[in-house]
Amino acid sequence: MDTVGTVVGALPRPGLRERKKQRTRDALVRAALDLIATRGYDGTTVDDIAAAVDVSQRTFFRYFASKEEVALFVPRLAEQQIAEAVRARPRDEAPLEALRRAVLDSWDAINEAVGRLVPVELHMRVYRVIESTPALLAAHLRRSAELEEELAGIIAEREGLDVDTDPRPRILVAAFGGVIRVAERRWSAGDDLSTEALRELMRTCLDHVGPALATNWRTDASLNRHNET
Amino acid sequence: MDTVGTVVGALPRPGLRERKKQRTRDALVRAALDLIATRGYDGTTVDDIAAAVDVSQRTFFRYFASKEEVALFVPRLAEQQIAEAVRARPRDEAPLEALRRAVLDSWDAINEAVGRLVPVELHMRVYRVIESTPALLAAHLRRSAELEEELAGIIAEREGLDVDTDPRPRILVAAFGGVIRVAERRWSAGDDLSTEALRELMRTCLDHVGPALATNWRTDASLNRHNET
DNA sequence: GAGGCTAGTGTCAGCCGCTGACACTTGACA
DNA sequence: TGTCAAGTGTCAGCGGCTGACACTAGCCTC
């Protein structure tokens, strides 16, 4: 049971073997995103990816449960960062404000974390593929749903609520998640693929959350300035 | 170009051949849902479904593009009904109210349409499988996203807005869709699997949309009555 | 009612994603 | 240095899905 003792911790030194594994994993991600960005998702086989890193297909599947998982590796990174950022928000903030600031404030950290793995520009191109490939989009939405579940838990805990009896945390997070996806879609469909453009889109969309739910838009002049093409 | 003349219309008489096709399609759906409900999604192969209806696997794929498509056939029916119901709402209704009433009011129509195809109770059991099967849930979420896209278009048109420049229709629909999904999840996780229970859950959740986005829950006593276990 | 036309079907072969089993190599650690 | 386990490659195989081609059966005309 306890073969511990020599194992001091995970952080100090990754171990020679461990580093090799990490390199293989990174190489697989990079190769996969590269291929997917140029040949599309369906045009890229797992064999292609494995061959590009010179490992067997079997090995690929020991690192990633599915082809989708590599393709969505970067978004997954971002999700983790966001969840962490929400957890770190001061507890006296209103829930929606906490979510909003978590996303906008952790932007640089996300970009940096992503950039350590792959060129951000590459990720941008992959993102378009994700949005335009049904199977990938589906997987992405499911992962987003899981993130929402986690966020709902965090929010509920902050507010001292039971996430299973009070629907509000989940509802709030669902609305929030929906808005994020709208921003993602608009961004991936537009011309400016910079991360800054996406950040601004998210900011704008989040600013519309309240007003968009207002009872009557037609008599609400306060928002129409966003409408001048 | 015009071999018409004898073909009066599509409605009058479906044609002998056409009816056979319809029967095969229905039989495939029923067999699929039956198998999926009892053996689970992954435990059901396309060969099983095809064999149950005594057609070849190849024929199955001529009716449905994928195994997911049969499994999600009923939800797809419901989505179509909802989109139609939203289109039929009076244009002087506020957007959120139109969505809300479309869902709640078309409930019986949906149930009837579903019931014509499969026992509603069977659909209920399949729904649980959908929620608990990652691949199916992913596909379901993607379809929901497509419905949201359609609804956003309808809302934008009602309000005389351009769906590509004004983010509000999409945001509203995204929030709405998120709430619907919360209701679905709560329902499929609970004990009462009746359609009436789901309808009530949706009503309750929709009633929470506004308040859930309020700035501060902790000082908002008006909602806490939902909290007594 | 015989014939031709075409929509619909079955069969077959094959790709791709993914998995279990087993043998081999190579880093870790005594 | 030798032992052990972690990591990898190979192989065989299943299930989803598709293209090609031949066959059957409903439809329409004459």
Image (cartoon, coloured by chain):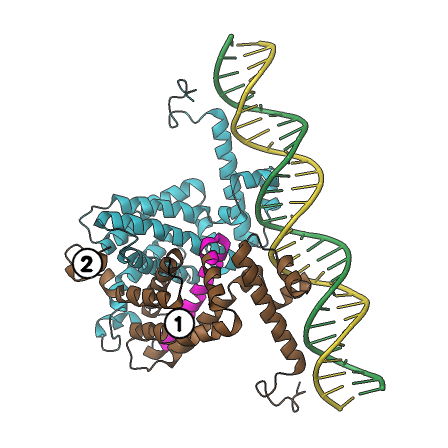
Chain colours: A brown, B cyan, C yellow, D green
Q: Main secondary structure of the magenta part?
A: helix
Q: Does A154 appear in magenta?
A: yes
Q: Residue B163: x and y, percent?
A: 29, 52
**How far is the residue under mark 1 from the one under mark 2?**
32 Å
Q: Tell me which chain the residue with mark 1 is part of.
A: A
Instruction: Name the image quarter holding the N terminus of chain B.
Output: top left
Q: Residue A152: x and y, percent?
A: 38, 71
Q: Which of pointers 1 and 2 lies earlier in the amino acid sequence? A: 1
Q: Is residue A22 left or right of residue B9?
A: right
Residue that carries the numbered disc 1 in the rendered image: A151
Q: Is residue A225 above or below residue B81?
A: below
Q: Residue A195: x and y, percent?
A: 40, 67
Q: Is residue C20 above or below residue A107?
A: above
Q: Is residue A58 left or right of residue B110?
A: right
Residue that carries the numbered disc 2 in the rendered image: A224
* Secondary structure of residue under mark 1: helix
Q: Nearer the viewer, residue A186 or B172?
A: A186
Q: Nearer the viewer, residue A97 or A129?
A: A129
Residue stretch rendered in magenta on the structure: A129-157
Q: Nearer the viewer, residue B211 or B186?
A: B211
Instruction: Name the image quarter holding the C terminus of chain B.
Output: bottom left
- Asked which quadrant contains residue A13, the reply is bottom right
